[in-house]
Image (cartoon, rainbow, N blue to C red):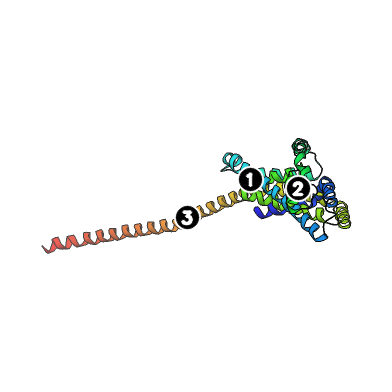
Amino acid sequence: MTTPLLLAAFAMGFFGSPHCLGMCGGLVTAFGLSMQEVSPLKKRGLIATYHFGRLISYSILGVIAGIIGTTVLAPILMGNSTPRILLGLVLVFIGLSMLGMPFLNKLEKVGMGVWKKLSPLRQKVFPLNTFPRALAAGLLWGFLPCGLVYGALLMAVVGNNVATGALLMFVFGLGTVPMLVATQETVGWLHKQIGRYKLRQLNGIIMILSGLAVIALPMAMKHMGGHGDHGAHGGHQMHDSSMSAPAEHGAHDQHSMGNEDMAGHDMHSAEEMPMQHHSQ
């Protein structure tokens, strides 16, 4: 199940990246303006360092989500099908969110309060002209309130593994990188294509269908398997009956033959007894 989840996380980050562009695009532009005095090569290195710091933050959040999943949810849900059903519901929930349902808006508002408290730290990273500052900026901006990030964190929680949670969030972050590192012309083209073909909505539909499949298919297979076992058990009984019938019939014939032999032996003895008496 881990590989499909990783693919879903990457697709969620990539096709949801226009939302990231709206949230982080201005920040990336501000970072670029603060790097005007550095060489083009160093600028690319600083931008890469910033995104690496952001991915580290996502991974840390994934570790926290994984710990919650393994310590809080796992003991409650162990030994039944609830974890699988919960994963399916999360995929459906994320898919509906990508279709535009405002489920996570309130969480964004709560997170914005925390984000404002980080304002003094954010101001200290400018200008972004050194690698430590770029890394610090990425670490901070990884905690920017975002409904898409919160949806990915739900996947990390139900992943029921700390390492899986960290990897899911890292891969999700990788999916958001192309839109944020692309040039202005490429960003416009990507944004246009995603909007033109409704790729975000299509990915939402795929996630909804995947969630429903995660919930329903194992149940259907178990139901079909139950009927198969019943049929096999019935066939086994019929086979045993058909095998036992000839055996019982053979045993009956042997018993009858034994009785006939005993009867013949008694008759022969009866015939010999008068002859012996007469000879005497």
Q: Nearer the viewer, mark 2 or mark 3?
A: 2
Looking at the picture, which amino acid does disc 3 mark? Asp
Label 1–label 3 contact, CB within 8 A: no
Q: Which mark is residue 137?
A: 2
Residue 278 appears in the picture as rendered: yes
Furthest-front residue in this view: 37
Q: CA distance from mark 1 to mark 3?
A: 52 Å
Where does label 1 land, which residue? 66
Furthest-left residue in this view: 280
**Mark earlier in primary sequence (1, 3):** 1
Q: CA distance from mark 2 to mark 1?
A: 25 Å
Looking at the picture, which amino acid does disc 2 mark? Ala
Q: Residues within 10 Å of mark 2 (few under 14, many from 20)?
A: many
Q: Which residue lies at the image location 80% right of the left edge and 61% below the top edge?
A: 41
Q: Which residue lies at the image location 66% right of the left edge and 42% below the top edge?
A: 86
Q: Nearer the viewer, residue 83 or 218?
A: 83
Q: Which residue lies at the image location 84% right of the left edge and 48% below the top edge?
A: 30
| Residue 170 coordinates in the image, percent (x, y) | 70, 52
Label 2–label 1 contact, CB within 8 A: no
**Mark earlier in primary sequence (2, 3):** 2
**Mark earlier in primary sequence (2, 1):** 1
Q: Secondary structure at mark 1?
A: helix
Residue 259 lies in quadrant: bottom left
Q: Nearer the viewer, residue 40 or 145?
A: 40
Q: Which mark is residue 240?
A: 3
| Residue 211 coordinates in the image, percent (x, y) | 71, 47
Residue 255 lies in quadrant: bottom left
Residue 8 appears in the picture as rendered: no
Q: CA distance from mark 2 to mark 3?
A: 75 Å
Looking at the picture, which amino acid does disc 1 mark? Gly
| Residue 129 coordinates in the image, percent (x, y) | 79, 52
Left or right: where 172 falls relative to 80? right
